[in-house]
Image (cartoon, rainbow, N blue to C red):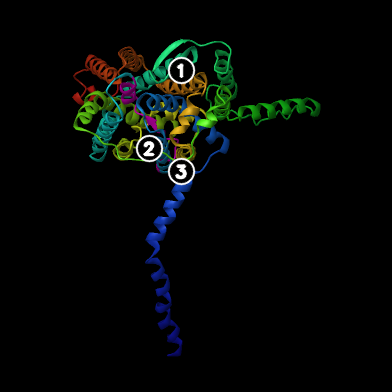
Amino acid sequence: MESQKPQIQQPHALQTPSETTHHSPLSGFASNFAGKMKTNLGFRSKWAELNGAMGDLGTYIPIVLALTLADDLNLGTTLIFTGIYNIITGAIYGVPMPVQPMKAIAAVAISGTGFGVPEIMAAGIITGGVLFVLGITGLMQLVYKLIPLSVVRGIQLAQGLSFALTAVKYVRKVQNFSTSKSMGNRHWLGLDGLVLAIVCACFIVVVNGAGEEHRVETETNGDLGGDEERPRRKKSILRNIIFSLPSAFIIFLLGVILAFIRKPKIVNDIKFGPSSIEVVKISRHAWKEGFIKGAIPQLPLSILNSVVAVCKLSSDLFPGRDFSATSLSVTVGLMNVIGCWFGAMPSCHGAGGLAGQYKFGGRSGGCVALLGTAKLVLGLVLGTSLVKILNQFPVGVLGVLLLFAGIELAMASRDMNTKEESFVMLTCTAVSLVGSSAALGFVCGIVVHLLLRLRNFSRDQPLSTIWMDAP
């Protein structure tokens, strides 16, 4: 009987682990969540991620500056909200998912009269609401699956070339962002001259090359003698140092320094402290104008470039990581449904921003989280007074950053293997560029794709193959 006592007590002793496992699901979820956040926000390379964070500024700064100068956009509020967006999207996706201005709405606001902050915010809320509904209902994923790859590549190529053309305009012409117009040829010399822009572009080409992944040389020739190997090794070390420089960060830092040199008195215009965040009052007329002039032209661009193209480009740049069109549509929708009520600029993801950040070394969510933290700090510390500094930033330098972002995005279309796919892609690109409308290019690309499928259609093929990509 005494020998059975330990056996009787063993179940009681085993109750302690069972009691601890009662709490394990919550602790396991917290552990998995913390591990995922650490993975998504972790830096692959500190300098490379910092450099990649600068890759989207060629698009972000000009549009935000133009909206602030022309329409009194609250820059401090925009920095705070977009900074939060950057941090959250970096934590969710684990890649440098950008947060960019909605370009169609910004274009209407800058060029049109009677389209002020209430109309801008109304357009952003409506666009975000539609994208959110498309996301949660699963319709966006259906759209993504139905659109042929050649049409997506056409939209990407058009957007990339549009960025590149705009960048060349920034470099060659003096810009007035408050009116979104070019004023005249840029001088060769000066703190914002052509020579400065050309030197910056050459510096990026030398450091980053064509954007190849493996730039650092590690091999040495063991067959060489000691005296011959030493100079070669020194040259290899020098090349590795040059190729590892954070080129975009260095150029951006140079631009900030030149901004203070161009106008030292801007130090007196800086006021510390965040801007006041207030709920925007939107009238019935503002809702109407925002819908007609802002949301209608923005929706096709957001669906195609902010969701479909970003989803495809993400899978191209980060193989093995699938990003659903549903999640991208929902995050874009929530950003605007929430932030626009407080005067934050309508925002979205963008294939150009993703390509730019990848071009300069961004590989993880920590890249955009770092950028978001910087935006958040600047918004809280400097607020709207930051516009005084940005207004003196060399525009030619911004053009250089935008140029390489556009080229990187356009290069994503190089995987069209057949003449038929290239034909559809180039048709879509040409119409998008000439017509200045991604929606028009999309429609033409779909029509051409269907006509080519019908032309190749035979009785031995099922009708469903008409829509799918060519075999």
Mark nearer the N terminus (1 vs 3): 3
- Disc 2 marks a residue whose amino acid type is Asp
Res. 327 visible in picture:
no
Location of the N terminus (image quadrant) = bottom left
Few, some or many residues within 10 Å of mark 3 (<14, 14–19, 20+):
many
* Left/right of residue 218 with respect to residue 448 in the rendered view: right
The dot on residue 179 is none
Few, some or many residues within 10 Å of mark 2 (<14, 14–19, 20+):
few
Asked which secondary structure carries label 3, the reply is: helix
Few, some or many residues within 10 Å of mark 1 (<14, 14–19, 20+):
many
Q: Please say if 276 is above or below 52.
A: below
Q: Quadrant of residue 50?
A: top right
Mark nearer the N terminus (1 vs 2): 1
Q: CA distance from mark 1 to mark 2?
A: 31 Å
Residue 44: within the magenta?
A: no
Q: CA distance from mark 1 to mark 3?
A: 31 Å
**Labels 1, 2: front one:** 1
The spot of residue 386 in percent (x, y) is 47, 32
The one nearer the camera, 240 or 372, is: 372
The dot on residue 40 is 3
Mark nearer the N terminus (3 vs 2): 3
Q: Which residue is mark 2?
A: 322
- Disc 1 marks a residue whose amino acid type is Ala
Q: Which residues are magenta?
A: 92-110
The dot on residue 167 is 1
